[in-house]
């Protein structure tokens, strides 16, 4: 049989795999199970010594000065906007190509999401279109590193510093990512990571914020 890989299976082409690809089926080995049992035996079911160790390892891994473990990436993004003082009347620029939480936290903070379209080849926010959406009410940009591919952070940092905007990165997909010489988590003002079951590193539910800002 001729295999035509150019036509997607959904349009009548041949499927490229035989088995169903499960979205969000984490690898859980004996090591993880041992840690879990150890946690149960320790009695520390809330934030305890393992959370502190996770934060310390995360600081080492990203090179960021601070890492704060949270219940989710959504909680992290919301907290980031809160500590930046983003509230009603503020506008926050982000991308429409993301999980709903990115825009929802802006609405939840009482502010207005302003969408900038993505680049065709990366699905990341197009830096060339950001400036035209900046108004006197714009306070921050939330770039999303889609599928682990970092946004053009040099350009986004230039725009943010030119217009005095904060950068809150949604790095839910991008724990391992680097942009040029910068490790994600150590680029913008605040970066939010997710450890939800479908993400690169899994705790079930969980999130982390990193920042170099002591305040
Ligand atoms: C999963 C995801 C989130 C939310 O992460 P939670 O930890 O589930 O709150 C935010 N942004 C993007 C891009 C995501 O994929």
Image: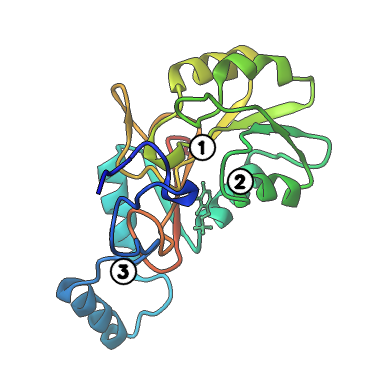
Q: Dot 2: few (<14), some (14–19), or many (≥20) neighbours within 10 Å?
A: many
Q: Residue furthest right?
A: 89
User: Of the residues tagged 3 and 2, which is closer to the observer?
Assistant: 2
Residue ID at (58%, 39%): 97
Residue indicated by mark 3: 49
Category of crowding for the residue at label 3, using alpha-carbon neighbours closer than 10 angstroms: few (below 14), some (14–19), many (at least 20): few
In the rendered structure, which disc, 3 or 2, sits on the residue that comes first in sequence? 3
Residue 89 in picture, x, y percent from top left = 83, 36
Residue at the spot 35% in from the left edge and 64% down from the top edge: 20
Q: Which residue is denoted by mark 2 in the rendering?
A: 102
Name which of mark 1 and mark 3 comes first in the sequence.
Answer: 3
Q: Vertical placement of 113 versus 119: above or below? A: below
Front residue of this view, candidates 115 and 61: 115
Task: Tell me, yes or no, whether the two marked residues, 2 and 1, touch with CB atoms within 8 Å.
Answer: yes
Q: Report which quarter residue 22 is drawn in.
A: bottom left
Q: Is residue 61 above or below residue 46?
A: above
* Residue that label 1 marks: 144
Cβ atoms at labels 1 and 3 below 8 Å apart: no
**Mark 1 C-beta to ligand 1 under 8 Å:** yes
Examine the image and state in which quarter residue 21 appears: bottom left
Residue 175 percent location from the top left of the image = 35, 45
Vertical comparison of 42 with 82: above or below: below
Q: Is residue 119 above or below residue 149?
A: above
């Amino acid at each position: 049989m001729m295999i035509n890989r150019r036509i997607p299976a959904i349009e009548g082409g041949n499927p490229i795999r035989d088995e169903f690809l499960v979205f969000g089926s984490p690898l859980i080995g004996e090591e993880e199970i041992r840690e879990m049992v150890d946690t149960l035996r320790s009695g520390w079911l809330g934030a305890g010594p393992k959370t502190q160790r996770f934060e310390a390892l995360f600081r080492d891994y990203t090179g960021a000065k601070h890492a704060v473990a949270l219940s989710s990436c959504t909680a992290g993004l919301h907290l980031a906007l809160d500590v930046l003082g983003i509230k009603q009347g503020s506008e926050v620029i982000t991308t429409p190509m993301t999980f709903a939480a990115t825009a929802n936290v802006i609405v939840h903070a009482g502010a207005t999401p302003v969408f900038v379209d993505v680049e065709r080849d990366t699905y990341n926010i197009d830096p060339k279109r950001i400036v035209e959406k900046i108004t006197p009410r714009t306070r921050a940009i939330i770039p999303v590193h889609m599928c682990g591919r970092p946004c053009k952070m040099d350009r986004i940092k230039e725009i943010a510093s030119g217009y005095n905007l904060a950068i809150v990165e949604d790095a839910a997909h991008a724990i391992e990512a680097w942009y040029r010489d910068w490790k994600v988590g150590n680029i913008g003002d605040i970066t939010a990571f997710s450890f939800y079951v479908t993400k690169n590193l899994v705790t079930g539910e969980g999130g982390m914020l990193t920042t170099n800002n002591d305040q």
